[in-house]
C-alpha cells in the first residue's frame, strides 16, 4: 500500500488527481489507512504492538508524500490544507469603515468654535434632576419635567420623578446640564462648548429623532451682551453653512436665559429652527454660586443633526441613523 500510494501521489499531475489520491489513501472517511486502522481491533493481542508500529510507519510515509505532492502542485505552505485555493484569482477588497457623518460634523463644529476660543467640556448622559432642571431654573411643576417628555430611569422611587428625590436619574434632555457642571467647577471667565447626545421621547419624523446631539455654548465674563451672542452665532453659521446662509433670531423663552431667542436658518423656502439661546438668567448664576451683579454671560444650544442636514442637504434625519451603507458611504 505504501509504495502504491507514494507512486500515485508522485504521479499526480494536477490538483484534481492529487485530491483523488489524497482521499483514496488518507481520507478521513473511506481512506485506505482508515480502513486498516479499523481492522486493528481484530489483530491478535500479541501482534498488536508490532502491527501498530508498522501502521504508524506507513502512515507517516504516506502523509509525507501527500505534503510533498501538495507543495509541488499548489506551490508552497500557505495553501496547505486548502487545495481549492487559486492564487491567481483577484482578491476581495476589504471594506474599510469610516467616520459617521455626525461625528464628522461634531469634529468640524469643535474646530470652528475652537478658532473662536471655545474649549470643549463634557458631562454625563445619565443625569440627576438638579443638573437637568433645578439649577437651570426649571421648577418642580414645569411641564419640561413631565415623565412623558423625559426618559426617567426606573429607580426604587418609581413615580417620584417630579420631585427632587435623591437617586432619581434621567437621560439628559439637553446639554445645558454641562453649563451647570462647568460653572460649579470653574470661576469666570468661561468660554466652553459641549457636544453630546441628548434624549427625548419625541416621535421620529424628518426633523426629529428620540436621540440627537446638541452643541451647547457658554460664555461668561464681565459686560457680556446680546450683541456678543448674536455675533458669535452669525460667525459660526457663516463658517459652517457658508457665507450666503440666512439666519434670523426670534424672541422666545427658556427658564435659564433672559432674554431668550430661537435661531432659524432659511432652507428650501422655509425657516427651520436650529437652536435656542439667550443671556444667562441671574437665578442660574445664583444656583452655581456666582454673583449675578459681577458677571454676565450668554448660552446657546444648537441641534447638531439639523446643522449637518442643512450643510449636506440631507432631507430626513432618520437617514443618519438607519445604518444604511448606501447612505452612509456618501460621507
Ligand atoms: C434646548 O434644548 C435648550 N437647552 C437650548 C438653549 C441652550 C437655550 C442654552 C438657551 C440657552 P430646544 O428644546 O429648542 O432648546 O432644542 C434645541 C435644538 O435641538 C432645536 O432647535 C433643534 O435643532 C434640536 N432638537 C430638538 N429636538 C430635537 C429632536 N427630537 N430631534 C432632533 N433635533 C432636535
Image (tube, helix red, strand yellow):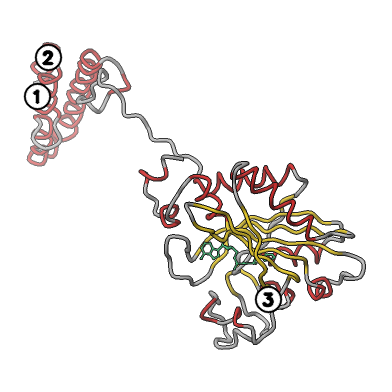
Neighbor class of circle 1 (other Cα within 10 Å; few <14, some 14-19, many 20+) is some
Q: Residue at the spot x=45%, y=49% of the render?
A: 314
Question: Marks 1 and 2: in contact by CB < 8 Å?
Answer: yes
Mark 3–mark 1 Cα distance, whole angstroms, equals: 76 Å
- Choose mark 2 or mark 3, whichever is in front: 3
- Mark 2 crowd level (few <14, some 14–19, many ≥20, 10 Å Cα): some
Spot occupied by residue 310 in the image (x, y as percentages of width and height): 52, 49
Q: Vertical placement of 157 versus 127: above or below? A: below
Of 215 and 278, which appears nearest the observer?
278
User: Which one is in front, 118 or 18?
Assistant: 118
Tell me where residue 3 appears, x and y as whole percent.
11, 15
* First along the sequence among labels 2 and 3: 2
Q: Nearer the viewer, mark 3 or mark 1?
A: 3
3D distance between C-alphas at marks 2 and 1: 9 Å
From the viewer's perspective, is 16 left or right of 65? left
The residue labelled by disc 2 is 12
Q: Position of residue 317 (x, y in %)?
A: 45, 56
- Residue drawn at the location 43% of the way across and 35% of the way down: 96
Q: Are marks 3 and 1 in contact (CB under 8 Å)?
A: no
* Picture coordinates of residue 192, whole percent (x, y): 75, 54
The residue lying toward the viewer, choosing from 148 and 260, is: 260
> For this view, does 57 lie left or right of residue 76?
left
Image quarter of residue 83: top left
Mark found first going from the N terminus, 3 or 1: 1
Q: Which residue is mark 1?
A: 20
Residue 34 position (above or below residue 261): above
In the image, the residue with mark 3 has its CB under 8 Å from the nearest atom of ligand 1: no
Task: Say if 59 sits above or below 286 in the image.
Answer: above
Task: Please give the residue where the numbered disc 3 appears in the rendered image.
Answer: 133
Give the quarter the ligand 1 occupies: bottom right
Q: What's the mark number on residue 59?
A: none
Query: What's the residue at 42%, 64% (across, down)?
Result: 205
Amino acid at each position: 500500500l505504501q509504495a502504491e500510494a507514494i507512486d500515485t501521489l508522485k504521479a499526480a499531475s494536477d490538483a484534481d488527481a492529487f485530491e483523488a489520491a489524497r482521499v483514496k489513501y488518507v481520507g478521513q472517511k473511506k481512506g485506505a489507512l482508515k480502513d486498516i486502522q479499523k481492522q486493528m481491533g481484530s489483530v491478535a493481542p500479541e501482534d498488536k504492538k508490532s502491527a501498530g508500529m508498522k501502521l504508524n510507519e506507513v502512515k507517516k510515509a504516506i502523509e509525507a508524500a501527500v505534503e510533498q505532492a501538495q507543495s509541488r502542485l499548489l506551490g508552497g505552505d500557505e495553501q496547505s490544507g486548502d487545495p481549492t485555493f487559486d492564487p491567481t484569482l483577484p482578491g476581495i477588497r476589504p471594506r474599510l469603515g469610516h467616520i459617521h457623518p455626525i461625528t464628522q460634523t461634531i469634529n468640524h463644529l469643535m474646530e470652528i468654535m475652537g478658532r473662536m476660543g471655545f474649549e470643549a467640556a463634557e458631562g454625563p448622559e445619565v443625569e440627576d434632576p438638579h443638573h437637568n432642571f433645578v439649577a437651570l431654573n426649571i421648577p418642580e411643576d414645569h411641564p419640561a419635567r413631565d415623565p412623558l417628555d423625559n426618559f426617567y430611569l426606573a429607580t426604587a422611587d418609581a413615580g417620584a420623578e417630579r420631585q427632587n428625590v435623591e437617586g432619581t436619574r434621567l437621560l439628559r434632555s439637553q446639554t445645558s446640564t454641562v453649563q451647570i457642571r462647568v460653572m460649579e467647577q470653574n470661576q469666570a471667565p468661561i468660554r466652553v462648548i459641549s457636544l453630546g447626545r441628548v434624549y427625548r421621547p419625541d416621535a421620529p419624523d424628518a426633523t426629529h429623532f428620540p436621540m440627537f446631539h446638541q452643541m451647547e455654548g457658554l460664555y461668561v465674563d464681565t459686560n457680556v451682551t446680546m450683541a456678543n451672542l448674536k455675533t458669535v452665532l452669525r460667525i459660526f453659521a457663516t463658517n459652517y453653512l457658508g457665507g450666503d446662509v440666512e439666519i434670523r433670531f426670534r424672541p422666545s423663552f427658556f427658564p435659564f436665559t433672559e432674554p431668550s431667542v430661537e435661531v432659524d436658518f432659511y432652507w428650501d423656502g422655509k425657516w427651520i429652527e436650529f437652536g435656542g439661546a439667550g443671556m444667562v438668567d441671574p437665578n442660574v448664576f445664583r444656583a452655581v454660586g456666582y454673583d449675578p451683579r459681577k458677571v454676565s454671560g450668554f448660552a446657546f444650544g444648537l441641534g447638531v443633526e439639523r446643522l449637518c442636514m442643512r450643510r449636506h442637504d440631507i432631507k430626513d434625519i432618520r437617514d443618519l441613523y438607519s445604518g444604511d451603507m448606501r447612505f452612509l458611504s456618501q460621507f
